[in-house]
Amino acid sequence: MSVCIFVLSIKYMDSSNDSYWQRNLAICLFGSFATVFAMTLVLPFLPLYVGELGVRGHAAIVQWSGIAFGANFLAAGLIAPLWGHLGDRFGRKPMLVRASLGMALTMPLMGMSTNIWQFVGLRLLAGIAGGYSSGATILIAVQTPKHRVGWALGVLASGVMAGNLLGPLAGGSLPSLIGIRATFWFSGALILIAFLATVLYLREEPGKFRVAKEQRSGGWSQVQNKSIVLAMLGTGLLLMIANMSIEPIITVYVATLVDHPARVTLFSGFVMSTAALGSIVSASRLGRIADRVGHTKVIIIALTTAGVLLIPQALVTSAWQLIVLRFLMGLSLGSLLPCIAAVIRHNVPENFVGTAMGYSLSSQFSGQVLGPLIGGFIGGQIGMRAVFVGTSILLLSGAAINRRIGVLPAAPKSISLKN
């Protein structure tokens, strides 16, 4: 991660134009990684902390852990359009400053909770105040030249996915070294660094913000290709349902594929992480390709490929086969969120970008909530393999809908796409 930031910073210093977008990308990359890493750091020991807060009984601990886990996503999904709208009116940097400061304050307070109600309330507050990575996505989508949007958002998405991947890994070991409550304080300190970097070094491009302030009227009525924007909202929802639908059944499904019960948890961890690893590897590369051939084309190909790859996942006979297929699926889906953001960016006016992106984020958060519910219900009522088949049908349907709506033209060939 440090190498990526260093390279991006050097590119900015060497740039001959007067744009801030490359330096902003470096700062947003670090800030998004740091905030997501810090927020996911607590997940492995969440049930243990719930027990420390006075909750007794296995069923109660599981129930309250689920409530605490979901509270953050619920609040973030509900508030995202508002923050996007305020970003359109007052600038995107203030939204990043607000998000990083809010999370830097609430994380240590979580470590000082004395009962479960305080903890859940602070998780809700963190969801309301947070959203750094989503705000960073909006800022980069607006400030990056249109022919580089896919690549830039792919780089940013790689940082987010790296935080999602490494946070739980670190969270599994840190509590034994410094204690559970100190881990919350460490998370707050890490986010505080992101806050300081954002305040001191991130620059909001003046010209872009002036356009937004001068064109506050209109909004959705100014969007000419409403069907494309709505398709992107639906595509984001489908993607998150597809990613999250197997979460409730992974461990149980892996248990049917391995001979030794002691290895179930290990292989389950591999299955969960390899898809994220594949997305990290492919996000920026596919984003660059999308800038050249058209973002909607890449979305259609990605949905189709992932939908096809889900079928053999229902037929595997070993855990290693599932791991390989999940990695390939991650590769195919790596650029999907950046491409969705790029298509929205290309099809809404400057004064409506933040609001539209906020609605997109809300649809994605909805998918994160609905995915496990749908997967758990289908897995329990029909069978675990049916979850993969059903998710495949959803993704292939999404590809067909996007193809029916139409493909945006590719970026002009006269524009240099060098990175």
Image: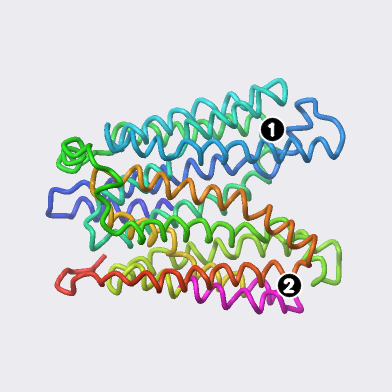
* Up-down relation of residue 358 to residue 109 (above or below): below
Asked whether 307 or 54 is in front, the reply is 307
| Residue depicted at x 16% and y 41% | 211
Residue type at mark 1 is Gly
Q: Is residue 310 magenta?
A: yes
Q: Quadrant of residue 380?
A: bottom right
Left/right placement of residue 207 relative to residue 255 reads: left
Mark number displayed over residue 179: 1
The percent position of residue 217, horizontal first and vertical second, equals 22, 38
Q: Select label 2 or label 1 by which is in front.
A: 2
Q: Quadrant of residue 309?
A: bottom right
Q: Please name the predominant secondary structure of the magenta segment in the image.
A: helix
| The C terminus: image quadrant | bottom left
The percent position of residue 273, horizontal first and vertical second, equals 61, 60
Residue type at mark 2 is Ala
The percent position of residue 122, horizontal first and vertical second, equals 59, 27
